[in-house]
Amino acid sequence: MMAIFHDMIEKTIEVFMDDFSVFGNSFRTYLSHLDKMLKRCEDTNLCLNWEKSHFMVKEGIVLGHKISKNEIEGKISQRDEMPQNSIQVCEIFDVWGIDFMGPFSSSRGNKYILVAIDYLSKWVKAKAIPTNDARVVCKFLKSLFGRFGTPCAIISNRGTYFCNDQFAKVMHKYGVTHHLATAYHPQTSGQVEVSNRGLKRILEMTVGENRASWSDKLDDALWAFRTAFKTPIGCTPYKLVYENACHPPIDLEQKAY
């Protein structure tokens, strides 16, 4: 969310987790800011829950404080007296989100992309596969564990390819906790959804008109995704994982000469 509205934050919009507020010092400027926000949502394919949206609000309660044209009203002085929540410390590759993309037009017999993203580093692992079933998921996870180590938790939606005995046996064998996103709060697996959209956009630009070649271009798309700057971590996933800036193929070619 922060990345989508990075140039609007504190100017026309305030963001907190998956909630945001558009503001203006007059009705005219408010409508202008609202129009820009909605246009950004359309451009980034961000879907809004209209049932939870409120417009032309003159005052309201946000995080226990009354917000109005008089700014914030509340007992701010008591903030330091409130009990502090503990912060859970985790390592890279401790928590992965997993999901399917597709179906797409067949490419070398593949119709789906199985995507896994590390919640901390934003590192993405993906594989083109012909079907979306428990067998390919379990095989993919075993390969993931062998490459990056056994994680503490896997987060997924409630698809039958993730909720089955075969998947549960793999989780039990490796001692991994399986967390499910609820129908009422799908944002639990939001990291994967954001990665899916980003990976899909890169694939579309890489493939061009030859859509049948998407499976051949998947590795190139993953390279682009891993070496792209991510606002939440302040660097690229590549640099966070390998503690070093990557050298694109063109740089290596120039050094060779």
Image: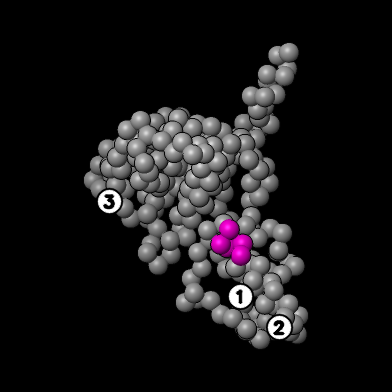
Among the two numbered marks 2 and 1 on one chain, the one whose residue lies closer to the N terminus:
2
Q: Residue furthest left?
A: 165
Return the x and y of residue 163 as percentages of the image width and height. Answer: 29, 50
Hey, what amino acid is under mark 2?
Phe
| Secondary structure at numbered mark 1 | loop
For disc 1, the marked residue is 63
Viewer-nearest residue: 102 or 186: 102
Name the quadrant of the C terminus: top right
Tell me which label, 3 or 2, sits earlier in the chain: 2
Left or right, 225 with reference to 109: right
Q: Which secondary structure lies at badge 3?
A: loop
Q: Which of pointers 1 and 3 lies earlier in the amino acid sequence? A: 1
Position of 154 compared to 40: left or right?
A: left
Residue picked out by circle 2 = 27
- Nearer the observer, disc 3 or disc 2? 2
Residue picked out by circle 3: 160
Q: Is residue 202 visible?
A: yes
Q: Nearer the viewer, residue 138 or 255?
A: 255
Kind of residue at badge 3: Thr
User: Crowding near pointer 3: few (<14 within 10 Å), some, many (20+)?
Assistant: few
Give the magenta part as a residue range.
39-43
**Which residue is nearer to you in this view: 248 or 205?**
205
Mark 2 residue element: helix
Q: Nearer the viewer, residue 11 or 104?
A: 104
Tell whether position 221 is magenta.
no
